[in-house]
Image (cartoon, helix red, strand yellow):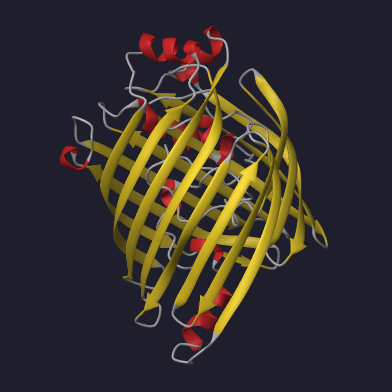
Amino acid sequence: MRLLLGSLILIPMVAVTQPLPTESGIEEPLCNIESDSLQYSGDATDYYAVATNLFGVSKRELRQATTNRGEAGRVAIKPGVRFGYRREMGPLTAASLRLSYAEGVANIEAGISTKGWYDVRIGGENLFSDANVVLAYEASTEQMPVCFYGLGFLAPRRNARTKYYRHISEAKLAYMQRAADNLWFGIGANYSFVRSRRMSRLGLEYLQEAGEVLNQIRTASIVGVIRYDSHRREDNVERGVRFTLMQAMHPNILTDYTHTLWHTSLRVDTYCPLWQGATWITDIVGELWSYHTPWLLWPSAGIDRRLRIYSYGSYVDRNMIAAHAVVRQHLYGPFGVEVWGGAANVFSKSIRWSQMLPSYGLGVRVNLGRGLMLGLGYGRGRAVDGVVIYVNEEF
């Protein structure tokens, strides 16, 4: 694994970044509709993102909230409407309403698509002790259509495509404590209900062949996290490091499943300025679940922003690792370009080199202002290629 990750970091290319989750759908970030271009969920490793990107809160808003602490009646209301597109979901639209006040924010969001996707979220965060303590909370329900080939690396090669709807309802609570300038420690508790709906007969046959017949699971988890974030943007370049390590336990006494489940999530992003207007970015992700974890919680290659060339549901297994690199170049005004490359591996017990999933391509980026970034690219992967569209990605 070390050799794999090390070699991919050295590849002089990098990935179009589309904020989609690397995890299975349990420990996910709080609120993703507005900040993640109406895409399905976000990164497990960003779940405890600590005020600077929970619910799209900018550093300026955080500073203002801290400065305005104690000013009675200081409330800002910010409505928003977004549009987007994703192959599995079709055209998307969502509306949001955010209330910012001296001690934090509250958020309401709802989205819908032409192909049966919907998402409703209510949540917020409160700041304490001069923003050195953050308490975040959220309740959500979401459904997304999934193109399904079965489980394991070989499934898309030997099985016909079918379809089902993945439904997730969750309640989340997170407490974060600043230990140093950029270092945070946190704990949290999640409750999730995950189920497959309208699974076709062919899909049921795929699951039976794999010995996975569960169609729903209720589970609660206890989560611990360490996060370091020194990432900064300066004059069209970026610098710094983001590191998040999360460990979650799903005790069998708190779920309707017979085994205690474990979930480990690791993410490391580095940002290094090159020549004028250029940034070199590397990204390493690991999503690991314990052996008895049911398929409903497994990660998929297509669920991750670096692997948007693969549709969610095409490569699904118990574990996933990925490593990518990106070079971004600012050109003129709001315009820029980027080149990306890397690979991922989904596996049950151990990595197989013959089953790597490459991803590479290039794209253009347009900064539309007010924190809105639009990207359009073309990518290739293993037996797949196509156009990638993304809005407000964060990589």
Determine the image quadrant of residue 96: bottom right
Question: At 56% from the left edge and 68% from the top edge, which residue is drawn?
Answer: 98
Horizontal side of 168 relative to 97 (left or right) equals left
Q: Quadrant of the N terminus?
A: top left
Residue 275 visible? The answer is no
Q: Is residue 200 above or below residue 380?
A: above
- Residue drawn 55% across and 39% down? 324
Q: Is residue 388 above or below residue 182?
A: above
395 left or right, relative to 186: right
Residue 258 at x, y percent in the picture: 18, 29
What x and y, as percent, mark residue 301?
Answer: 51, 30
Q: Report x, y in % for residue 364.
A: 77, 46
Place of residue 131 in the rendered image (x, y in percent of width and height, measured from the top left) = 40, 78
Q: Is residue 137 above or below residue 16?
A: below
* Res 189 seen here: yes
Which residue, as the protein is rendered here, is positioned at the far right?
332
* Residue drawn at 32 percent across, 33 percent down: 217
Q: Residue furthest front?
A: 198
Q: Is residue 238 above or below residue 178?
A: above
Front residue of this view, candidates 278 and 209: 209
Q: How many marks?
A: 0
Give the residue drawn at x 64%, y 50%. 37
